Image: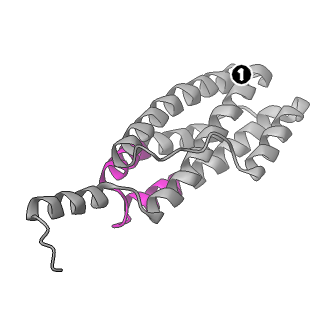
Amino acid sequence: MNKVIPLALLIAATSASAAGLNATDTGFLAKAVRGNNFEVEAAKIALQMSRSETNRAFARQMIADHAKLGAQVKAAVAQADPRMKLPMTVTYKQWDMLKSLKTSGRGFDRMYRMQMINSHRETYNLFNQYSQSRYANAGLRRVVSAAKPVVHMHWNHAFNLAQ
């Protein structure tokens, strides 16, 4: 039996799948969201352990900026695929880095500075690659592209943190 599908239904289905999330998006989100979680947790530790007001101010800025970006990413993801659950944790490597921060004692500020430089470099490169991908979800790509200057600013500021 030959079934005829109305054109409007076919167009709607195509648009919905084009707006959804694919492997490029989910791979990016797995790394980016865990990186965001790591930087927020490291900032919370810095608020408690840093002896430098410069580093504590940076940590407060990290928490505020990352909360804003996290909300924007969640909104873009919810629009593309409301069923998608974002990671709530960090990677094992990031977990070890957080543990090292907590036990670093007098070397905390030096370690925090290096972790923030490295993490923001990785994040900027990840955001740059994703924002240039033709396979990236358009809504999520807009959020990521708009966030790149802030990530770059954080990376630059990390170089000026106290040691």
Q: Which region of the structure is painted magenta?
A: 124-148
Q: Residue at x 38, y 65 (%)?
A: 133
Q: Is residue 25 left or right of residue 137?
A: right
Total tally of numbered discs in the picture = 1
- In percent of width and height, residue 95 lies at 77, 44
Q: Residue beneath label 1, please? A: 47
Does 55 appear above or below 15?
above
- Near-viewer residue (2 or 85): 2
- In percent of width and height, residue 23 lies at 47, 64
Task: Look at the image and name its color scheme.
Answer: one colour
The secondary structure that dominates the magenta segment is helix
- Near-viewer residue (6 or 105): 6
Quarter of the rendering occupied by the N terminus: bottom left
Does 115 appear above or below 50?
below
Locate residue 149: give its quadrant.
top left
- Near-viewer residue (15 or 118): 15
138 magenta-colored: yes
Secondary-structure class at tag 1: helix
Q: Which residue is drawn at 58% across and 41% down?
A: 36
Quarter of the rendering occupied by the C terminus: top right
Give the amino acid type for the residue marked by disc 1 in the picture.
Answer: Leu
Q: Which residue is drawn at 46% across and 30% down?
A: 68
Q: In this view, does 158 lie to the left or right of 98?
A: left
- In percent of width and height, residue 49 lies at 80, 23
Q: In this view, does 64 lie to the left or right of 119?
A: left
User: Residue extending furthest bottom?
Assistant: 1
Neighbourhood count class around disc 1 (C-alpha, 10 Å): few under 14, some 14–19, many 20 upward = some
Q: Which residue is drawn at 37% across and 60% down?
A: 136
- In percent of width and height, residue 12 lies at 18, 57
User: Residue extending furthest left?
Assistant: 7
141 magenta-colored: yes
